[in-house]
Image (spheres, rainbow, N blue to C red):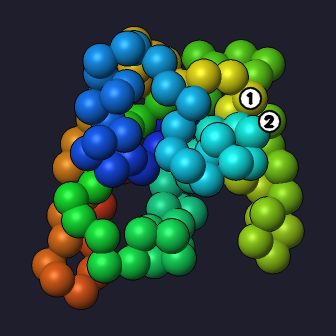
Amino acid sequence: MFIYKILRPAEMQALEATGTSFGAPVDITDGFIHFSTATQLGETLARHFAGEAPLLLLAYQADDLGDALKWEASRGGALFPHLYAPLRRDQAHWVKAVGFDGLMHRLPEGVE
């Protein structure tokens, strides 16, 4: 199962430069990397990235992240994937741009 991390360009540049990252400011504050499933992405974009562009979407295989990945209740009791380890660039299966038409984000092809 793929899970997804949304990054801003500067956050992606930092990940590319070092190969690892503790994530966005909210991830650092919370002490874990916030991920979303495919079905959670739309709400995550609307709640936390409204009006922001450009954005990048990274796809990770949940099983590749091992015991550091925890599924924890969040919004309305839904289980969200949280990574209690640095984000590693070499574990991302792909990186794609999130589309934006000035009002809404569009997920790239391949989100499953």
* Near-viewer residue (52 or 60): 52
Report the amino acid beneath label 1. Answer: Tyr
Is residue 50 placed above or below 93 in the rendered structure? Answer: below
Whether 110 is drawn above or below 38: the answer is: above
Residue at 64%, 41% in the rendered image = 28
Name the quarter where the N terminus is drawn.
Answer: top right
Determine crowd level at label 1: few under 14, some 14-19, many 20+ residues with C-alpha closer than 10 A: some
**Which quadrant holds residue 105?**
bottom left
Question: Of callouts 2 and 1, which one flags the residue occurring earlier in the amino acid sequence?
Answer: 2
Instruction: Name the element at disc 1.
Output: loop
Secondary structure of residue under mark 2: strand
Residue at x 79%, y 19% (from the top left corner): 67
Q: Is residue 88 above or below residue 51?
A: above
- Which marked residue is nearer to the observer: mark 2 or mark 1? 1
Q: Residue at x 39, y 78 (%)?
A: 50
* Residue identifier under label 1: 84
Q: Is the C-beta separation of discs 2 and 1 under 8 Å?
A: yes
Report the Cα–Cα distance between label 2 and label 1: 8 Å
Q: Seen in the image, is 48 located left or right of residue 100?
A: right
Q: Position of residue 108 (x, y in %)?
A: 24, 54
Q: Is residue 109 in view? A: no
> In which image quadrant can residue 12 be found?
top left
Q: Is residue 98 left or right of residue 15?
A: left
Q: Position of residue 33 (x, y in %)?
A: 63, 39
Amino acid type of the residue that numbered disc 2 sits on in the rendered structure: Lys
Residue 70: mark: 2
Question: Is residue 9 in view?
Answer: yes
Asked if residue 83 lies left or right of residue 14, the reply is right
